[in-house]
Image (cartoon, coloured by chain):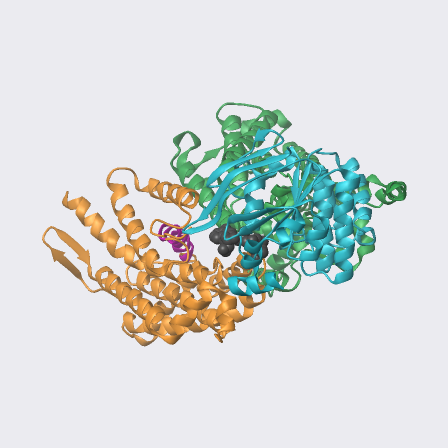
Chain colours: A orange, B cyan, C green
Amino acid sequence: MDFILASVIDGLLLGFVYGVAAMGLTLIWGVMNVINLSHGPIIALGMFGVYLIFGAFSLNPYVAILIVAVLGLVLGVAIYYVAVQRVINAPHLSTLLATFSVNMIIIGLGTAIFSASPRNVEFSLGSLTLGPITLLGTRVVAAFAAMLVAGALYLFLYRTRYGRYIRAVANNRDAAELMGVPSNRILALSFGLGTMLAAIAGGLIATFFPFTILAGGAYELKSFVIGVLGGLGNPIGALFGGLILGVLEGIIPTFMPTTWVPVVEFLLFVLILLVRPQGLFGAKS
Amino acid sequence: MILQVEGVGKQFGGLQALLDVTFDLPAGQILGLIGPNGAGKTTLFNCINGVYAPSAGRVIFRGEDVTASKTYDMAHRGLARTHQIVRPLNELTVRENVTVGACFGREGHTLGKASQIADEVLAFVELSDRHDQLAGSLNVGQKKRLEMARALAAQPYLLLLDEVLAGLNPSEISRMVDIVKRIRDERSVTIIMIEHVMHAVMNVSDRIIVLDYGEQIAEGSPEEVANNPKVIEAYLGDPELAEQLLNE
Amino acid sequence: MSENKVAAPAKKLRFMPQLAGRPYLGLSLTLAVIVIMILWPLVTGKDITRETVFTILLSVTLASSLNILLGYTGYVSFGHVVFFGLGGYVGFYLLAIQGWSLWMAMLAGGLSSALLAYLLGRAILRLRGAYFALATIGINEAMRAFINNFKPFGGPIGMTLNFQVYRDYGGASQALWMVFYTMGALTLLAVTVSFFVRTSKFGLGLLAIREDEDAAEVMGVVAPKAKTWAYVLSAIFPGIIGVLFFFKNGSIEPAPAFRLHFSIETIVMVMLGGQGTVLGPVVGSGLYQGIRGYLLTSAIFKNIQLAVAGGLLLLIVLFVPDGVIGWLRHRFPFLRRVLQ
Ligand SMILES: Nc1ncnc2c1ncn2[C@@H]1O[C@H](COP(=O)(O)OP(=O)(O)OP(=O)(O)O)[C@@H](O)[C@H]1O
Ligand SMILES: [Mg+2]
């Protein structure tokens, strides 16, 4: 029993971080109907960002994540203007391939520079013992950081002018434009926020898991699953979706081999796409 | 009767778009369907040809209950329609567009026969000179005629025309009115025609139905409808003004 | 009226060019290009040429099959490799474990992929746009994870072929040539099928679905059925050549059989040549493999070949979205008869 409880709590902690990654993916989808296939490599860049800053300047990894967040934002805005803007109104295939080409560029350069050998950030916060349960300090902090990020995103979207603009553009781009919202710049900002969230998630993961330049791919797929669970385009839903996935990953191995986890995850993914494409919490049809 | 609409209603969430619409349509007539914007005219078409399932009532086409059939079933049964907002298959040529209508419509012709029909129909709607052009590159008037040609190529028993005159200039309108009349006379196709251009619809229709806020407020010959105070009120939205006009 | 009827037959000849004077010019040209490729290794007499051409032929077959769904019907299948992998696995199992002949195994591989597509099609082809693309990714990943756990297929280790098997086909080196020619024959067949789909009534229905599915249905195209058959057709050849590929390879494992990247490469080839045309996937595959081969061997680009390929892809998507053939057809309308 304790064992299950420990796995569930561990899964929950991880789920918050997954949630942040998925929020990035789903924010971009919600605002501009683009599935960002460079999501995974950007998560990996977040990991490497923290790794490099920590290694070079011995900065605290959490401070490094702040820097990585800013870089992630800038990178996303740049990707938007170079690769996405021109095809934003084209059929889905174009945006899928445009963002996939960014994926190839990042992975290609990344492999050449970093090789594919695993790295890890040599950093520890010890562990926390609560009765029968022992939790890794870095994971607990990562979960709290993820909650902070989610809260900040919520405040940004609902309490600031630019947040309102983003929601207006997501709702109806033409109408927003008529009301004087600079929609192209807002799209760029939204894409930047999406990649920023991916980079932050990568940075947080790097504090407790080893990684390679290819490591983002798995989290990208998880983000798809979570995004669909929570309803594509719904960032808050994504956070809950992340928690569900985290808990599933914690629980499933207690009664079947771990290797079955992805089978369950992806079947769930396809099933939800088919029966509830608006997600578990979405109301709009 | 080619078409019987019995108590058809349609609800969108809280909005009652159609309420208890009932009428019979004998073969060979042109029925005009008029009413202010948002009256539910297009929705009625959508309920007849299977885009929406009606929330109430029945649709009977050539003696068979076809309520809530699929749109392609209705096409196979001999019903064709045009769209108010034209929907050309942009990357296909004009002739290919029309060939689709002939291939998959009532007769389900082979490709060879269908392209022959396409040529004939294109000549009928006076689009022959554009046959090789991509449909996306036509102007609005031409796209309207393409919609018409596609529907005709299916060789339907009943044709639903949704505002085929909207956005056309006066000379295009008279050409189109002429085409509509000839469809009925030469091809013996029954027609329901939604139209805002009053003089045109009054001119071609054998009978007219008026919808307002989803309800059927009048039905009769063009003259009867034109002199019906309820109709004038619906169009002007102001009973006093309507009365004033009537008194003149 | 009567004058129109007289005028019609003359114009008919200009419709669908393949029905007119030179019926199959476009197809003949495409097939001729492939035959020349098949014969090329005989000219050079080198094994390396054969291997290069094999890769191109494999790509042409996959791309032409995918094009039926992607180019004609307008549905973006990102996880199309699932049919290559599943067909490969089923066939390999029958070959290696049950002792079937290669031919029967290929047939079984193709049929099992077709069956999967049929069952899936009924369900997921209801999804449109990016939702469909995502679902195909999910299905490929679920299948990969499942095979990873499926003991009869060897789980994560996969299966290997007893070397003895090649003896039935005249020894290992003889078998390689046989595999090559079989691949060539399948490529010719796949392109021919693609051509006949494109120029048939069924294909016209698919094009109508691609342009506007609802409008197509209003005109009488039974979209659910047509889409499902397009999906099935696009799955058969990947299933068959999956068996051939892993037979040549001698072993099969989940990761290479269901590699998502492989699907996306196939999409890129279709795009590069021109989606929705018969010749496009052929040209696109040749170009893609050519560029890739060059990048992999070039001293400057060797290490960053993936990044360079990504950059090229981006340029194509942004500036030549219709691909080479699409661009040529648009630019030089008189070439349409040849470049189908
Ligand atoms: N799919 C839908 N969902 C919700 N409401 C709808 C839908 N389709 C139509 N409506 C509403 O139903 C009412 C009737 O619309 P409809 O398009 O049938 O009007 P109409 O008579 O064709 O008007 P117009 O002359 O402007 O074309 C309108 O209020 C419209 O907003
Ligand atoms: Mg209308």
Any part of residue B91 in sight = no
Residue A29, quarter of the rendered image: bottom left
User: Which percent across, then down, holds residue C8?
Assistant: 86, 42
Q: Quadrant of the N terminus of chain B?
A: top right
The magenta stretch spans residue A224: yes
How far across and down, in percent of the image, does residue B96 sit? 74, 46
In the rendered image, the quadrant that contains the C terminus of chain B is bottom right
Q: Is residue C186 left or right of residue B4?
A: right
In the rendered image, the residue lying farthest to the left is A131
Residue at the (32%, 67%) spot, across then down: A154
Secondary structure that dominates the magenta span = helix
* x and y percentages locating residue A133 in the rendered image: 14, 52
Across and down, in percent, residue B124 comes to 81, 47
Query: What residue is at 60 percent from the left and 26 percent from the top?
Result: C167
- State which quadrant residue B188 falls in: top right
Q: Residue furthest front?
A: B247
What residue is drawn where x is 24% and y is 56%?
Answer: A13
What range of the chain is rendered magenta? Answer: A216-230
Tally of numbered discs: 0
Q: Is residue B189 left or right of residue A252?
A: right
Is residue A65 or residue A153 the one in the foreground? A153
Q: Is residue C113 visible?
A: yes
- C70 up-or-down from B155: above or below: below
For residue A216, above or below residue C25:
below
Q: Nearer the viewer, residue C7 or C315?
A: C7
Closest to the observer: A67 or A163? A163
Residue C160 or B88: which is nearer the viewer? B88
